[in-house]
Amino acid sequence: MKVTVEVDCTPEEARRFLGLPDVSKANDVYVESVAKAMQGAGSLDQLQSFAKQVAPMGEIGLKLFQNFMEQGGLGAMTGTSSKKSKD
């Protein structure tokens, strides 16, 4: 038997329902500091250097995140998951 539930809510309502913390203030501070730092960069090399310092685990972290998102998107598009379901 398959049951599908559709919930129509805003991201804010979903965050509250799931009990996730509100990190909007921290995000605003982070975005502001990144924007200020990028304004001070005078060349492409400085921007690349800054991006490597800001990203968690540098380029490796970005690649891991990219792979994670690609696998999740692939599973969502094909309707498959990594877990085997029992009938």
Image (cartoon, grey):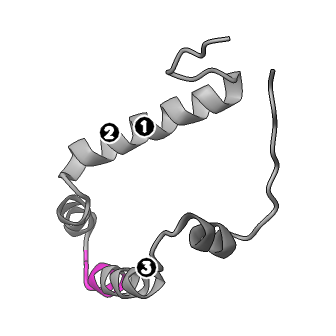
Residue at left offset 43%, top offset 86%? 28
Q: Residues within 10 Å of mark 3 (few under 14, many from 20)?
A: few
Q: Position of residue 56 (x, y in %)?
A: 23, 57
Residue at left offset 63%, top offset 20%? 80
Residue underneath mark 2: 64
Tell me where the magenta segment starts and ends, as one range. Answer: 35-42
CA separation in Å, label 1 and label 3: 22 Å
Judged from the image, the secondary structure of the residue bearing numbered disc 3 is loop
Classified by dominant secondary structure, the portion drawn in magenta counts as: helix
CA separation in Å, label 2 and label 1: 6 Å
Tell which of 83 and 28 is nearer to you: 83
Judged from the image, the secondary structure of the residue bearing numbered disc 1 is helix
Judged from the image, the secondary structure of the residue bearing numbered disc 2 is helix
User: Quarter of the image containing the N terminus?
Assistant: top right
The mark lying in front, picked from 3 and 2, is 3
Q: Position of residue 43 (x, y in %)?
A: 25, 70
The kind of residue on which mark 2 rests is Leu
Does the CB distance between marks 2 and 1 fall below 8 Å?
yes
Which mark is drawn over residue 68?
1
On screen, residue 6 versus residue 87, left or right, reads right
Q: Position of residue 45 (x, y in %)?
A: 21, 62
Residue 29 sits inside the magenta stretch:
no
Looking at marks 1 and 3 on the same chain, the residue that comes earlier in the sequence is marked by 3
Residue underneath mark 3: 23
